[in-house]
Amino acid sequence: MRRTREPELPILSGSGHSTSDVAAAPKKGDLIVGGDGAAGDVMVRDPGNAVRIQLDAGGLEQALTAMSTEPQIRVLVNGATGGVQLGGADTDGKLTLRRSNGTVTATLDAREDSRAGLWAGGGGCHGHVLVRDSAGVDQVSLSCGHNEGKITVHNAAGASSIELKGGGGSGWFGGRGENGDLLLFSAPTAEPTSDNASIWLQGKDGSLTFRDGAGREVLRFADATLRVGIDGNAGTLMVRDAAGREVLRFADATLRLGIDGNAGTLLVRDAAGRKVVDVDGAGARIEVGVSGHAGVIAVRDSAGRETIRLDGADGDILLTNGDCAEEFDFVDGTVAAGTVVVIDADERLAPCAVAYDRRVAGVVSGAGRFRPAIVLDRRPGAPRPAVAMIGKVECNVDANHGPIRCGDLLVSSPTPGHAMAATDPARTAGAVLGKALRGLESGTGRVPILVCLQ
């Protein structure tokens, strides 16, 4: 079967040159205007002979002059600069791309009332906009598909480094071996770095940093730790309820929960989800422990030793100190610890000065290694001496009236503020102070005793 040769399309030249004058062989469907030193122009005019479209291969200055002197020009293609301009002094520019079936798939619209501006997609096609570098590598892309809009920014190798998706409301920074960092600045800066960013979200270690106007780090969330504030700029954490009332405030080393009309509550749960600590502001109540998980409250001294323990498992209150004491007023306000005291006038106490004194009240607590575990009748104001009335305490003793041996009954001695061994059973009733826990052969000193008034 013999094939008929397709006819060549004409080559048009603004200077009247023939096909042989063209340096490169034209292809079918080409329209060539100009060449060999002659600029090519194509103009389309309306019925009133006004220019509506002009393709100008002349210089840029000539094209701009034409645009300013002939406001009827709507389209300008400048061959010298490779530029295309749509619109003129009296008309907004608009560019529309259609598919073969006539549906619009992309529009660039400069009209002020246009809500589109630049859009791509429609007519059965997903929209896609690409920005490439000089090497042709994708750097920024705007795309959509399956009802999901996506913005992608690529790194120097063309891999995605930032991706924001509208469909699932998700996004990520970094990837493929790169850290994802987000830097926000309070003002334009010549050299934007993490050191002068107001907010820094770092993907490498999952940290979040905020800086104040002086560039100081005032909030940092990293390594499962939240740090707020810095020297000269104290941190404050506030939480408000639905009515806008401040119900939680953490500032000045103080945590405040609740407000008038909205009581504060602090709940702590164990690994099984059980409420093991409940601080209830409404009922002014604290609960520790729950069924299956006993509560414990431990109080420690400045050396870290546990001095008080409330044990919910055994129902015990454990006190590591040695005696039960009560504060008293004294005839003489200054009384040393370890002093044996007796009841004096007006319910006040004084150091003993008589042997076998039945007014004996106890020993001033706090001498040596023993401290009071419980102190009664403590009042506001200046502290008063606490007198041990039961338990272990170190006591001033005088062995010059006879040696003191472990287990001896002790009574007041004529030596002021001292105890001695009871050697006269007839005078002992009602005068016993306690029992010696360690002996003293002679002289004066201090020994531990068990206070048990009789």
Image (tube, grey):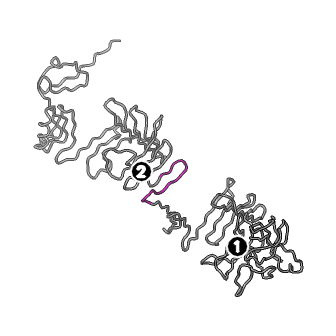
Asked if 49 appears above or below 435 in the picture, the reply is: above
Q: Quadrant of the N terminus?
A: top left
Asked if 219 appears above or below 323 in the picture, the reply is: above
Image location of residue 184, percent across then percent down: 39, 49
Asked if 276 appears above or below 347 in the picture, the reply is: above
Q: Which mark is residue 416?
A: none
Asked if one can make out residue 197 in the rendered structure from this viewpoint, the answer is: yes
Residue 224 within the magenta-colored segment of the rendering: yes
Residue drawn at x 19%, y 26% is 32
Amino acid under label 2? Answer: Ile
Q: Mark 1 or mark 2, which is nearer to you?
A: 1
Amino acid under label 1? Answer: Val
| The furthest residue to the right | 426
Q: What residue did someone put label 1 on?
A: 375
Numbered range of the magenta stretch: 220-233
Q: What residue did someone put label 2 on?
A: 199
Label 1: element kind: strand
